[in-house]
Image (cartoon, rainbow, N blue to C red):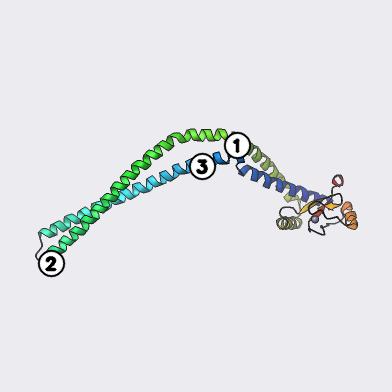
Amino acid sequence: MTNLLGQLYRLQTRIRFVHDREKRRDTVPPDLVEVDREYKEKVQAVAALKARLTEAELEKRKAEGELADHKEKLKKYQAQLRNVQSSREYSAALNEIDGVEKAIRSTEDRFLELEEEIEKVRADLDEREKTLPTETDRHEERLKDWRAEQRTINEELASAREEIARLEAEIPPRDRAEFHRLVDKKHGLALVLVQGSSCSACHVKVRPAAMQILKQGREVIYCDSCKRILYYEPQSS
Ligand SMILES: [Zn+2]
């Protein structure tokens, strides 16, 4: 029992360590938050401009296609106009021509607007892409210490995860499952040390009889108050 509780306690400690270190690794340090945000905005701006450029070029090609279609139609109606047999046919052809000319004008306007926009976006993008590599270098330089810390954390995590896997393999499946259930229910703290005869999580005193059993390591004792498993280490009491 003592051995099992020792393993579970170690497992819990390592799991908590992993969570803590992961959080630290993935949280931008407060003094770098602003710098990091500014840099990410620049990267995102470049990506957004690139996306817009692709989209606008597509729209421009589409407008070009439409314009060609409209002009083709215009030719057709103009030919019809020359061959009309009645005034009804004549005014119908005129109507069609009027409509298609309007469409041509609005498509041409759209085409020109797109051309103008593409030119502007491309200039903006060129400018930003020119400075981005330098910005990236400068950003990485500022983040250098944090990056080093992240690498160290990753190494610590790798060895902690190895130990967790080893411990999990050693602990009987039923105890392991029960432990994980309790970990989830008790916000990461399933086993708590007894310190000065009290539960170190909720500080409620452990009954003397329970304390006796704990010291003998005969069975699992739960805290009367917070219902966590009590873990007794002779040197910590
Ligand atoms: Zn307690």
- Identify the residue position indicated by label 3 in the image: 40
Which residue occupies 17% across, 57% down? 76
* Relative to 35, 53 lies left or right: left
Badge 3 crowding class, 10 Å Cα cut-off, few under 14, some 14 to 19, many 20 or more, is: some
Q: Is residue 167 visible?
A: yes
- Identify the residue position indicated by label 2 in the image: 88
Checking the image for residue 97, the label placed there is none
- Total labels: the figure holds 3
- Identify the residue position indicated by label 1 in the image: 147
Image x and y of residue 207, in percent: 88, 57
Task: Identify the mark nearer the N-term, 2 or 3.
Answer: 3
Which residue occupies 14% across, 63% down? 91
Secondary structure of the residue carrying tag 1 is helix
Task: Identify the mark nearer the N-term, 3 or 1.
Answer: 3
* Relative to 224, 33 lies left or right: left
Dots 3, 1 in contact, CB < 8 A: no
Depicted 230 relative to depicted 156: above or below: below
Badge 1 crowding class, 10 Å Cα cut-off, few under 14, some 14 to 19, many 20 or more, is: some
Image x and y of residue 153, in percent: 66, 40
Secondary structure of the residue carrying tag 2 is helix
